[in-house]
Amino acid sequence: MLKFWLLGFGFFGINIVWPLYNAYVPIFLKSFGLSSFIVGTYMTIDNIFAVALTPYIGALSDQTFTKFGRRKPYILIGAPLAAVFFLLIPISWKHSNFAAITFSIVIMNFSMALFRSPLIALMPDTTASEYRSQANGIINFMGGLGAMLAYLSGRFLYQISPIHPFAVGSVLLLLANLFVVLFVKEPVQKDVRSGFKLRETFTKSHAELVENLKEIMFSKEKSLFFMLLSIFLWFVGFNALETFFTSYAKFYLNLPEYIATGMLGMLSLAFMIFSVPAGYIGAKFGRKRTILAGLVSTIVCLLIGTLLSFRMSGEQLIEPFLFLFVVGGIGWALTNVNSLPMVLDMAPTWKVGGYTGLYYFSSMLANIVSPPLTGLILDLLGYWTLFIFSAIFVSLSMVTMSFVERGEPPKKV
């Protein structure tokens, strides 16, 4: 149990960074006079790198043999680079340097993509199948804690200076991943090599990635395909909110952005508190059933939020929206905590890193599609459509989840 909490520090660090990035970078970019479509397109830069690199790096880490382990070398390279360029984003904005902020966004997100999949793969590396929902619950609790701190403390730091939350986030990202490197023990490697042959490793990992994709597309049993499609669809809906809610609150609900980040903080708080119970609920009642329950609650919250926005504005919306974000955070925990274990339990044991990469391939592909598509809809129809757009994609994910037949933990005899 302790190892799950130790591993959770890596997720804590990552989830300090992304909420701050998604909350404030669109506001920074909007100040340069960009349309919502262009801002959304800019917000896909990180996800393009993630889609291109995450499954490849996951498969690459499966083939990596060093004295530090298979996964840790990527953390040691990626986390420090990400921390430095994350801090440079608000500094570049302060100096009104559009080229510098673009460069910082690109390099920061390239660096994050270098270590995300290997970090995730440490969980199945160290956890038996029947405990993965519980382990993922603890890990997501730590991630939710990071997101909650980012949103709730970030709003106060941002009021002092837009640079402050990014500086604190950079330091915590470094410290959290250093904690993982020092205290999380990778399993003993069966094939330890004295050297790291990059060319050989790239060739093998590329072949594995192609093989994994072929298995999904051409297999007669389509559970994994529909699982990954479901993940793609609900992440399109969730990313729309994550990227544009602060803009939606400021320009449509007449609420300042720091209030909006506080609401997102309540979602993260609810997600954090319910992450561990969500894992146990998934283990007891079934992962698929638990995911569907989470999707239903999310859809209901989105539709109620849309209706409320038609009748109220400004401070009137704060209390009802806070309630909806709490319920939505619980629904997101039920869905998100149990999805990765389903994918991993469809994976052969020797391809865990590669299949972890495929899970993130689906979510990151959604994060490429969602921001510009959402931005285009907002430009054409207005900010009032944000919650409806999100609800449509979450509803579609319920349909595709109905075709998933595998991914539950094996029954004990």
Image: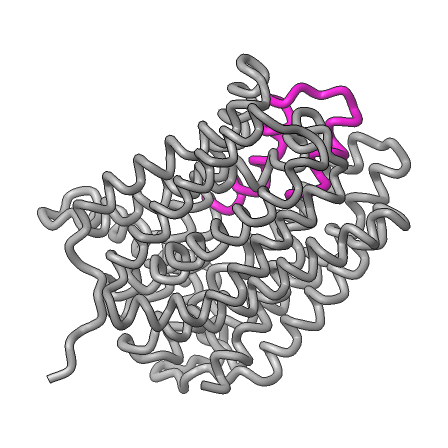
The picture quadrant where one finds residue 236 is: top left
Residue 186 locus on image (x, y percent) = 46, 82
39 up-or-down from 413: above or below: above
Q: Please tell me whether residue 328 belongs to the stretch shown in magenta.
A: no
* In the displayed structure image, the side of residue 176 where residue 221 appears, left or right: left
Q: Which residues are magenta?
A: 22-51
State the residue at coordinates (32%, 54%): 291
State the residue at coordinates (46%, 37%): 302
From this viewpoint, is residue 124 visible? Answer: yes
Residue 260 locus on image (x, y percent) = 68, 42
Of residues 355 and 70, which is closer to you in this image?
355
87 up-or-down from 197: above or below: above
The picture quadrant where one finds residue 179 is: bottom right
State the residue at coordinates (42%, 61%): 60
275 up-or-down from 44: above or below: below
84 up-or-down from 136: above or below: above
* In the displayed structure image, the side of residue 286 where residue 405 appears, left or right: left
- Count the marks: 0
Residue 325 locus on image (x, y percent) = 55, 48
State the residue at coordinates (83%, 54%): 157
Q: Quadrant of the C terminus?
A: bottom left
From this viewpoint, is residue 204 visible? Answer: no
Predominant SS along the magenta part: helix
Of residues 311 and 286, which is closer to you in this image?
311
